[in-house]
Image (cartoon, helix red, strand yellow):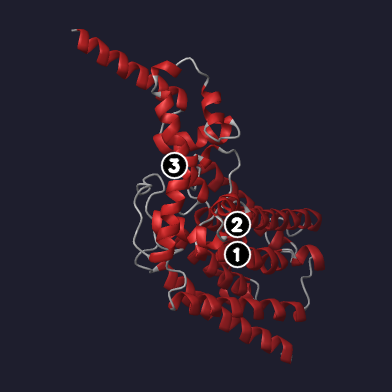
Amino acid sequence: MSDLATADLMLRAAAVALATATAGAIAVHPRRNRAATWAAIVVGGMGAFLIASAPGAYRVLGPGALFFNAWCLANPAAVWMLARALFREDPPRIEPFAILAVIAWVMVAMMGDYGRFGMGPVGQVPEVALWMLVFGRVVGVALLLAACSLAVARWRADLVEQRRRARAAFVTVFGAMFVGLASSDLVFGTHGAPLEFLIAGHTALLVLALALLLYFVHGGLAELFSEPTSQHTPPALAVVRTDAVEAALAAQVIATMTERKLWKREGLSIAGLARELNTQEYRLRRAINRHLGYRNFNEFLHEYRLKEVTARLSDPGERNLPILSIALDCGYGSIGPFNHAFKARFGVTPTQFRNQQAFAQKSASQNVIR
């Protein structure tokens, strides 16, 4: 065995050990949330990749190698789920068809992986194996890029400082390192990347696993992996915790938003509000997050806007006013985001809410007459 091959084997062993330890630490976190579960799967998938891609893995592990191969191939889907759990306030549930699609994709990718070495159902049809291999890698890269796009989206509206930093780290790790490893077959062909490239990639995985473990041990991931309070039951806007400068700024935010009704401005951003208050963005984020309890600036705006919307939908004098007109007047730029925010908060559409209020008012008036 050459010196480079020996070095690569040692790097793999160390990285697998660290990835396993990190995944285990995240998995047993006492207050873990959905993001922690997916993070444990993703970090464990790093170790699975190093095992499955090791020379002679199938010879040593036999059919057991299929498990690690399937895990590492499915890891881009887990990364995508991690991004949804981390960076969306209302991550949708996993649909059964999505699970079936991932299983089918992994099976096709595995047949292509083994087929290029003359193994499996398409081992004797190299052209088909090649196309299956390319399909698997392209889908994997697409999922990783989609996950990175979720991390970038709404970055400016995020009020949680640790999560904002996590977005940048997420894009760096999964947009560069993981995409590079996942696309190596597309770049270097079916024979795989040269050993020098693999050593560099495996060294990066080792450093990443070590950094994640140390960061987790020191409590750096506690806020990301702890279940937050529901975004649909935020604290009252008038409640401000006592904490000197930031508390004073939070009180100023409430007063300004209430008196000047800045929330009616379409496209109001954290930067725009900071200019109105003549303060820095990071101070404003801290004030709204730490003292008013909001994790996202859009949720903060929804609280004001939806309060006004429900009052107007309940007003008999505005019963004939189009719902779109009310939404636009309350700061929403279009009907789509408004409907989504309204139903997420109240569980019914604006039309259903208005009808319910009209029915309740009619019933109340009939009871008074009786």
Contact between labelled residues 2 and 1, with CB atoms less than 8 Å apart: yes
Horizontal side, residue 293 vs residue 153: left or right:
left
- The residue under label 3 is 258
Q: Nearer the viewer, residue 285 or 123?
A: 285
The residue type indicated by label 2 comes to Ala
Q: Position of residue 366 (x, y in %)?
A: 25, 10
Q: Dot 3 lies on which element? A: helix
Horizontal side, residue 117 vs residue 358: left or right:
right
Looking at the image, tell me whether mark 3 or mark 1 is earlier in sequence order: 1
Q: Residues within 10 Å of mark 1 (few under 14, many from 20)?
A: some
Mark 1 to mark 2 CA distance (whole Å)? 7 Å
Q: Residues within 10 Å of mark 2 (few under 14, many from 20)?
A: many
Q: Nearer the viewer, residue 202 or 300?
A: 300
x 62%, y 61%: residue: 73
Looking at the image, tell me whether mark 3 or mark 2 is earlier in sequence order: 2
Task: Pick the quarter of the image with the N terminus.
Answer: bottom right
Q: Dot 2 lies on which element? A: helix
Mark 3 to mark 1 CA distance (whole Å)? 37 Å
Q: Nearer the viewer, residue 240 or 220?
A: 240
| Mark 3 or 1, closer to the camera | 3
Residue 170 image label: 1
The residue type indicated by label 1 comes to Phe
Furthest residue in direction bottom, as rendered: 3
Q: Position of residue 272 (x, y in %)?
A: 60, 50
- The residue under label 2 is 151
